[in-house]
């Protein structure tokens, strides 16, 4: 090797170790490289003071020179730095570094400066060390390195595979993954290997087959390259197949799952013959003729130059670009040619009655094809003063026509086949007559060609007919005729005739006048009136007890009283037995008894009478039962005077009028020999 002086080689050693640490080799590796350099013979740390020119070594051939591996305290080394007494390229061991927890080996750059690279003598850990602040910062922490550190050191695993568990794999920056498949298709390959995109759709290669999965990897949309194996009844939902899953063999044959039931899956093989729609979608041009043949002599064939049609009797039609030929095997062929036309011409067949009509040829006209006279007819008049030059005059619009269309006399839309060239337009009145006793009055909806659509508004008579005369209509007199009765409501009958509605069933005009001045729905106003809620009849008799006991209850439906209402409770109680006192009490409860926590509304005074009554006046400020929104007078108004007073303030109760509740009358007898019963309970 090239010769270097000792100082230069020491500097190379430190630089080499430092650079390797920056490149994230492990601390142990760095220490090993350093020891190997020291253990070489002759040793790189040669010492001119040694007889052999090298420092002394122990039995393990490790350096023991105190000059080049000086062990000293941090304070002494800092003092030497300040005095410029360090030896460049010399190694020092700081025996109380990092707060006295480490022995660090460092190297002097020159007489005043230490390299910041250091090695922990005990652990081999490497890092940066600032001797002034006594801070050691590991470059690579001893223990398990990160994947980034491992790959920086080397990205080849040698003979070892990288193994992932069932749910882990390679995760890319866009959240796509490469890992084991989500489910097992059951044909070997134990879930295979899958590419999973960022939104969860999975493409899996398993047992030589390619699976296109759904968004969560559990449903198979299509399986490809299934060799020559067709699906079976066991290729079902347990393997990930669903209705619509596709199974494709290597030869292109395809099956579709129509029922993935467990153990009973149904697969349908798709035909390899394309539909006509599929063919024409791919391309609709061909040089081949297309023939539709029923096999018994009837066919239609489309060729690039003509269209041929023939039936089993030999009758045929041939259509060419410039001619049409009709062939009758018994009488010959007729051809219509357009070779002499210089302009566009439209030929229109006139409307004729049912039957057989014959075309007239120019050669059929007497006189060599020249029209010599014209007679008056539909919509025209003819002046034949000069037969060689007749004058043809148009008449006024024509509306009169006939129809043989079958129609029933009734109101509503009807269609008639009539003459062409009539003058009808929408909304015109039309009279449709079978005879004077059976006819209809209508307005025109539309007229086109020979089709007249009308809306019948009124009619006379009945029946279905096929012989009609149609013409413009005036005001249909019979449509506004009829008889009625004074002070009765009139109406139109089914035939659009006026009649009266009998007051026995319908209101009279006088009765209708009663609602004059009403400004809103009467039912709504009636519903707003608060109806009394009452229960008449003996309740449960309170006998042989002297405790507060239920006698009668009254259901108060939800929302039957609202905020702003001032309801009043009344009850009457009869007593038999002794002259003992009784006391009445009103309660509100969610059930028709005194269970739970009934709300006490009011209590009467004690009395010994055989008949008692109690009344309480309430004011509803809040109906929902919150905030003690129902106020109750603390005493009963004296019926005789209409006057009642009390020193106590009104009771404030949390009664919920928005839900069903029960108003309850309870009785407290003072003598077990008495029997009392509430026989009337009412809420006004």
Image (cartoon, helix red, strand yellow):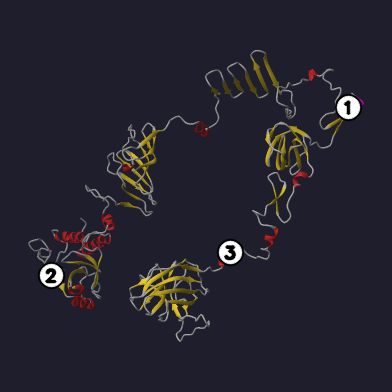
Q: In this view, does 71 lie to the left or right of 498?
A: left
Q: In terms of depth relative to the viewer, which is nearer, 250 or 678? A: 678
Q: In which quarter of the image is residue 464?
A: top right
Classify mark 3: residues with Cα within 10 Å, few (<14), some (14-19) or many (20+): few
Q: In this view, does 528 lie to the left or right of 196?
A: right
Q: In which quarter of the image is residue 126?
A: bottom left
Mark 1, residue position: 390
Which one is in front in this view, the residue at disc 2 or the one at disc 1?
Answer: 1
Circles 1 and 3 in contact, beta carbons < 8 Å: no
Range covered by the magenta-colored residues: 382-386
Task: Work out how far the residue at label 2 is from the one at label 1, CA to CA, in angstroms.
Answer: 149 Å
Kindly tell me whether residue 420 is visible in this rendering: no
Q: Which residue is drawn at 36% across and 51% down?
A: 176
Identify whether 412 is placed above or below 379: below
Quadrant including the N terminus: bottom left
Q: In terms of depth relative to the viewer, which is nearer, 302 or 530? A: 530
Mark identifier at residue 310: none
Task: Work out how far the residue at label 3 is from the one at label 2, CA to CA, in angstroms.
Answer: 114 Å
Identify whether 185 is placed above or below 576: above
Q: Residue at x 65, y 16 (%)?
A: 328
Q: Where is residue 120 in the image (x, y as percent from the top left)?
A: 19, 67
Q: Where is residue 371 in the image (x, y as percent from the top left)?
A: 84, 22
Q: Which residue is drawn at 56% across and 20% down?
A: 298
Mark 2, residue position: 66
Kindly tell me whether residue 239 is visible in this rendering: yes
Q: In terms of depth relative to the viewer, which is nearer, 352 or 672? A: 672
Task: Work out how far the residue at label 1 is from the one at label 3, CA to CA, in angstroms.
Answer: 81 Å
> For the image shown, how many numbered marks are present on the structure?
3
Q: Secondary structure beneath disc 1?
A: loop
Mark 3, residue position: 524
Q: Where is residue 563 in the image (x, y as percent from the top left)?
A: 51, 73
């Amino acid at each position: 090797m090239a010769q270097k002086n000792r100082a230069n080689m020491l500097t190379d050693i430190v630089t080499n170790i430092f650079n390797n640490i920056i490149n994230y080799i492990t601390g142990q590796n760095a220490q090993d490289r350093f020891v190997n350099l020291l253990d070489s013979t002759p040793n790189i740390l040669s010492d001119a003071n040694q007889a052999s020119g090298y420092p002394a070594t122990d039995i393990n051939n490790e350096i023991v020179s105190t000059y080049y591996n000086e062990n000293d305290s941090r304070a002494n080394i800092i003092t030497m730095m300040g005095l410029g007494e360090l030896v460049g390229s010399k190694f020092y061991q700081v025996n109380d570094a990092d707060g006295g927890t480490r022995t660090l080996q460092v190297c002097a750059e020159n007489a005043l400066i230490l390299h910041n690279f250091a090695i922990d003598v005990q652990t081999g850990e490497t890092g940066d060390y600032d001797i002034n602040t006594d801070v050691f910062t590991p470059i690579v922490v001893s223990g398990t390195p990160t994947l980034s550190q491992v790959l920086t050191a080397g990205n080849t695993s040698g003979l070892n595979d990288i193994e992932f568990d069932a749910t882990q794999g390679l995760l890319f920056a866009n959240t796509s993954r490469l890992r084991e498949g989500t489910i097992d298709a059951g044909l070997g390959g134990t879930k295979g290997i899958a590419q999973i995109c960022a939104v969860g759709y999975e493409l899996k290669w398993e047992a030589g087959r390619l699976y296109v999965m759904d968004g969560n990897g559990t449903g198979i949309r299509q399986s490809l390259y299934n060799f020559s194996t067709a699906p079976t009844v066991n290729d079902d939902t347990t393997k990930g197949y669903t209705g619509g899953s596709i199974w494709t063999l290597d030869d292109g044959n395809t099956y579709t799952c129509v029922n993935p039931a467990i153990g009973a899956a149904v697969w349908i093989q798709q035909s390899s013959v394309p539909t006509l729609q599929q063919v024409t979608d791919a391309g609709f041009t061909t040089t081949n003729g297309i023939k539709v043949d029923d096999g018994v002599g009837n066919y239609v064939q489309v060729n690039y130059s003509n269209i041929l049609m023939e039936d089993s009797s030999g009758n045929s039609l041939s259509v060419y670009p410039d001619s049409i030929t009709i062939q009758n095997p018994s009488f010959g062929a007729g051809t219509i040619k357009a070779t002499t036309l210089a302009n566009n011409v439209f030929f229109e067949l006139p409307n004729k009655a049912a039957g057989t009509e014959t075309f007239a040829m120019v050669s059929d006209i007497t006189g060599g094809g020249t029209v010599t006279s014209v007679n008056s007819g539909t919509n025209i008049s003819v002046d034949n003063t000069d037969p060689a030059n007749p004058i043809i005059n148009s008449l006024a619009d024509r509306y009169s026509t006939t129809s043989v269309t079958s129609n029933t006399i009734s109101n509503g839309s009807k269609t008639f086949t009539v003459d062409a060239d009539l003058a009808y337009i929408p909304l015109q009145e039309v009279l449709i007559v079978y005879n004077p006793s059976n006819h209809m009055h209508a307005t025109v909806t539309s007229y086109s060609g020979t089709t007249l659509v009308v809306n019948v508004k009124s009619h006379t008579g009945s029946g279905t007919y096929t012989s009609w005369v149609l013409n413009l209509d005036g005001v249909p007199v019979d449509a506004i005729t009829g008889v009625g009765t004074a002070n009765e409501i009139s109406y139109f009958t089914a035939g659009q005739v006026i009649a009266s509605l009998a007051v026995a069933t319908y209101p009279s005009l006088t009765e209708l006048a009663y609602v004059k001045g009403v400004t809103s729905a009467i039912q709504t106003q009636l519903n707003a009136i608060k109806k009394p809620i009452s229960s008449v009849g003996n309740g449960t008799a309170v006998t042989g007890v002297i405790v507060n006991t239920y006698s009668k209850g009254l259901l108060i439906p939800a929302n039957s009283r609202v905020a702003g209402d001032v309801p009043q409770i009344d009850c009457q109680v009869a007593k038999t037995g002794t002259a003992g006192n009784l006391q009445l009490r009103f309660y509100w409860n969610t059930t028709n008894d005194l269970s739970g926590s009934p709300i006490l509304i009011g209590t009467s005074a004690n009395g010994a009478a055989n008949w008692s009554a109690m009344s309480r006046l309430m004011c509803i400020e809040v109906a929902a039962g919150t905030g003690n929104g129902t106020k109750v007078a603390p005493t009963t108004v004296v019926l005789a005077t209409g006057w009642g007073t009390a020193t106590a303030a009104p009771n404030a109760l949390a009664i919920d009028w928005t839900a069903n509740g029960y108003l309850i009358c309870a009785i407290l007898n003072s003598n077990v020999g008495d029997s009392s019963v509430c026989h009337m309970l009412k809420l006004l």
